[in-house]
Amino acid sequence: MSDQDGDRHFPTAPGDTLVFENDRVRVWSMTLAANGGIYDFHQHEHDHVILWPDAGRAQAMQYGDEGWTISQVAEAGFVMFKTVGTGGPMLPHRIKNLEDHPVTHYIVELISEQSPSPVTLPTETNGRGSTSNPRMSL
């Protein structure tokens, strides 16, 4: 959607279902349909943890990119931590399932505290998978 000035606005819900919320955290689930199911462009405003309880493969595309340049391979129990920083939301991106079955992962937003970083930092993981991102912003 666009406003009158032509600026593009993206949803800030990082998942399709709000699972839990209190004054400190917000927990979302994102289920991607089999064979290319997409969660469309969105932005992350808060530092967050992403948990893949089951194995899965996905691709992502950042807004303005020509193709699906980001690759995600998750083993069961894969965890990523992302520092978004205080400088604004992350670049908008969308994600696509490469599996022949639905995959679900969970996003835990840290909403009660300001990020300790002024900028977005590289993703940290527990090593149970890999992320390939030429721009290192997801």
Image (cartoon, helix red, strand yellow):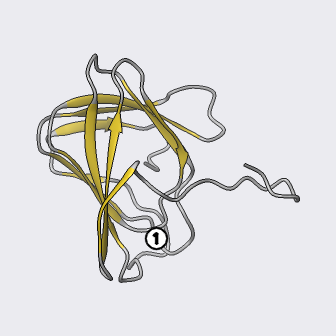
Residue at 38 percent across and 76 percent down: it is 111
Q: Where is residue 7 in the image (x, y as percent from the top left)?
A: 79, 56
Is residue 72 or residue 30 the one in the foreground? 30
- Residue 138 as seen in the image, left or right of residue 51: right
Residue at 14 percent across and 40 percent down: it is 128
Q: In which quarter of the image is residue 53?
A: top left
Residue at 56 percent across and 72 percent down: it is 87
Q: What residue type is labelled 1?
A: Gly
Q: Where 73 sits versus 99, above or below?
A: below
Q: Where 89 sits versus 135, above or below?
A: below
Q: Where is residue 41 in the image (x, y as percent from the top left)?
A: 56, 43
Q: In which quarter of the image is residue 127?
A: top left
Residue at the right extreme of this rendering = 4
Q: Where 23 sits versus 39, above or below?
A: below
Q: Position of residue 131 (x, y in %)?
A: 32, 38
Q: Position of residue 90 (x, y in %)?
A: 52, 58
Label 1 residue SS:
loop
Is residue 49 or residue 33 the one in the foreground? 33
**Which residue in the protein does label 1 denote?**
85
Is residue 20 or residue 3 the one in the foreground? 20
Residue at 54 percent across and 63 percent down: it is 89
- Residue 89 as seen in the image, left or right of residue 125: right
Q: Quadrant of residue 74?
A: top left
User: Total of numbered circles in the picture?
Assistant: 1
